[in-house]
Image (cartoon, rainbow, N blue to C red):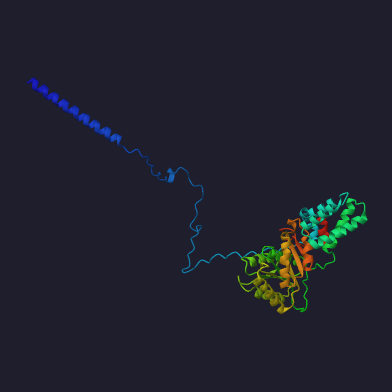
Amino acid sequence: MEIVILAAVIAVLALAAIAGLVVSGRKKKAAGSRDTRTTTAPPAEPHLGEDAETRLEEPRRTIEEVGLPEAETPGAVAEPEAAPAPVAPEIETPEPTAGRLVRLRTRLSRSQNALGKGLLTLLSREHLDEDTWEEVEDTLLAADVGVAPTQELVERLRERVKVLGTRTPEELRGLLRDELLTLVGPDEDRTVHTETRGAVDRPGVVLVVGVNGTGKTTTTGKLGRVLVADGKSVVLGAADTFRAAAADQLQTWGERVGARTVRGPEGGDPASVAFDAVKEGTDEGADVVLIDTAGRLHTKTGLMDELGKVKRVVEKQGPVDEVLLVLDATTGQNGLVQARVFAEVVDITGIVLTKLDGTAKGGIVVAVQRELGVPVKLVGLGEGADDLAPFEPEAFVDALIGD
């Protein structure tokens, strides 16, 4: 009997042990699968009354002091803000034209005096033999003086040096200056004629022509500044209707000095624009009308004929007072070919040489005058707005030979 009771007790203890192991395993499994993500607690509710951490120090407002929102009118539409008025460009005061070339002499001499220095060096040799005179000729030809003017200058120099005998540097400089000045032509009429010829009830008309790339439109704008600086009222005619933005470029130049620009549709008839420019200049009582024509290659017959048409249409209101041909000084002898063709289509009355500060070939001044029989009237000596100067032979020659 005791044995049976003991076996029962052992069985109960065994069952209890097994049950304990099962429960312990389940607890461990539950602990291992616990969520470890961090959760932010919601913000605590603010305390009220005496439980608040800080109290407001501002006094309470009465209901009379609290403004109520204004009631919107039914159907009311908010007015759009007015667009800012366009700002008119500031009118500039161009630099006076008197003495411009003298002021720019230093800039000109930096690139031009290679000609003068070369000639002075050759003429300073103790013995001037035939080889030396050939070098003098080569120096002049390299500067684009031209064959005929070079031969004339060398002959005069040889005669004067022979008579002079002893040659000091000062004597040589004076000798060379005199001969170059004679070659350039100090007595030529270099005035840009803007006065009315014929009818007195219209402005003077200046036609600006030239090939592409010579700076023609820029020159027209700069010439407008020159005339405004001289006290004249100017109207610009944008007759270059084929080059994109040419009219915009010219109008910008005009706005800077208060000059009106007459323009037409892109690709329109340039003769019509030129006619309208003269007409509006007459109606406004302007002093001068500057007409910028389309650049064209001198080898294109159709374009050159169109240029002649522009001049003929303008002349229905009166004669053209000045026809300026814009040439790039760096093109050298090729510029003379261009000049000849333009002179056959329109009567050139004056030359504008641009980019004269970028080349040592200042002799092109002599060559182009000799070729066309018309004077150089204006020279461009830089990119600045006031770097277009009336041509002054004395200042130019002084820049050639240097100090």
x, y percent for residue 391 = 79, 63
**Closest to the observer, 11 or 108:** 108
The N terminus, quarter of image: top left
Q: Which residue ends up furthest to the front in the rendered image?
A: 130
Q: Is residue 173 above or below residue 22?
A: below
The residue shown at (26%, 33%) is 27
**Closest to the observer, 178 or 249:** 178
**Residue 152 in sight from this viewpoint:** yes
x, y percent for residue 305 = 67, 73
Q: Which residue ends up furthest to the left in the rendered image?
A: 1
Is residue 171 left or right of 84 when viewed as pictured? right
**Quadrant of the rendered image containing residue 298:** bottom right
x, y percent for residue 379 = 76, 62
**Quadrant of the rendered image containing residue 311:** bottom right
x, y percent for residue 321 = 76, 73
Is residue 26 left or right of 194 when viewed as pictured? left
Is residue 154 left or right of 203 when viewed as pictured? right
Q: Which residue ends up furthest to the top in the rendered image?
A: 2
Is residue 237 left or right of 163 when viewed as pictured? left
**Residue 180 in sight from this viewpoint:** no
